[in-house]
Image (cartoon, rainbow, N blue to C red):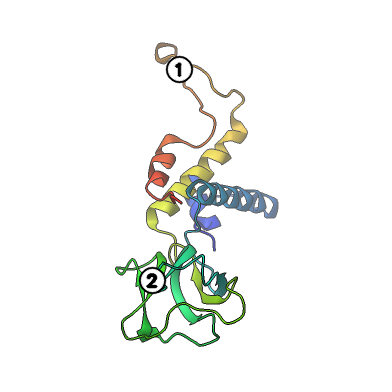
Amino acid sequence: MAYVTLQQFKTYRGITTTSTAGDAFLTDIIARAQQEVETYCDRVFAASTSASTHYFDAVRDVSDDRRTLYLDDDLCSITAIINGDGSTVATTHYVTEPRHGPPYRSIRLTGLSDDNWTYTAAPEDAIQVIGRWGYATTAPADIQQATIRLAAYIYAQKDVSVFDVTVIPDAGVMQVPQGMPRDVRETLEHYRRVR
């Protein structure tokens, strides 16, 4: 799911012209900026609109007490959970952690459940979690701003012929740094996943 629309980017940059080739070029820049944001933070900020299934090891991905399942990615909503024995885990039999809201990092079986995370044949890929995987259903506002700012930076690079120039304020020379702008990096630092 795109964090920034083509029209939002054009408004931000003050672009009023429209052409199929130009719009395709801008759309590519937006996608590139979004990919850089996701790569830098090691997470997807807007979940797909449809649910998908992640599979978990019933031994390796659970706690020693067999009550907590550790997720491999951010999860923002759950459609269903199938334990390793093929039974569907009732919504009243688990809680998500953190408890205050997504992104969820683990699922803990409650005291209402007599079950543990289990398996019948082999532990690998025994547990299924079906849901929308991502930080949230839509990207947070500051992630959207960082993406549009980075896209604008990438767009402006097409008109710059010199990179990494030393700053000489008295001479009016400005440095054009390579890589991600500092303000974008500072925003993204708060969202970087630590594994």
- Mark 1 residue type: Val
- Mark 2 residue type: Asp
Compared with residue 129, is residue 167 higher up or lower down, i.e. above or below? above
In this view, the residue farthest toward the top is 170
Q: Are marks 1 and 2 in contact (CB under 8 Å)?
A: no
Give the tally of numbered discs.
2
Residue at x 68%, y 55% (from the top left corner): 20
Instruction: From the top left corner, tell me how far across and down residue 131 is, in percent.
Output: 50, 75
Compared with residue 120, is residue 102 higher up or lower down, i.e. above or below? above
Instruction: From the top left corner, tell me how far across and down residue 44 is, in percent.
Output: 50, 58
Residue at x 60%, y 70% (from the top left corner): 124
Mark 2 or mark 1, which is nearer the start of the sequence? 2
> Pointer 2: what residue?
65
Residue at x 50%, y 37% (from the top left corner): 180
Q: Which marked residue is nearer to the observer: mark 1 or mark 2?
A: 2
Instruction: From the top left corner, tell me how far across and down residue 98 is, in percent.
Output: 33, 66
Name the residue nearer the viewer: 57 or 157: 57
Find residue 167 and name its label.
1
Q: Residues within 10 Å of mark 1 (few under 14, many from 20)?
A: few
Q: Residues within 10 Å of mark 2 (few under 14, many from 20)?
A: few
Find residue 113 and name its label.
none
- SS of the residue under disc 1: loop
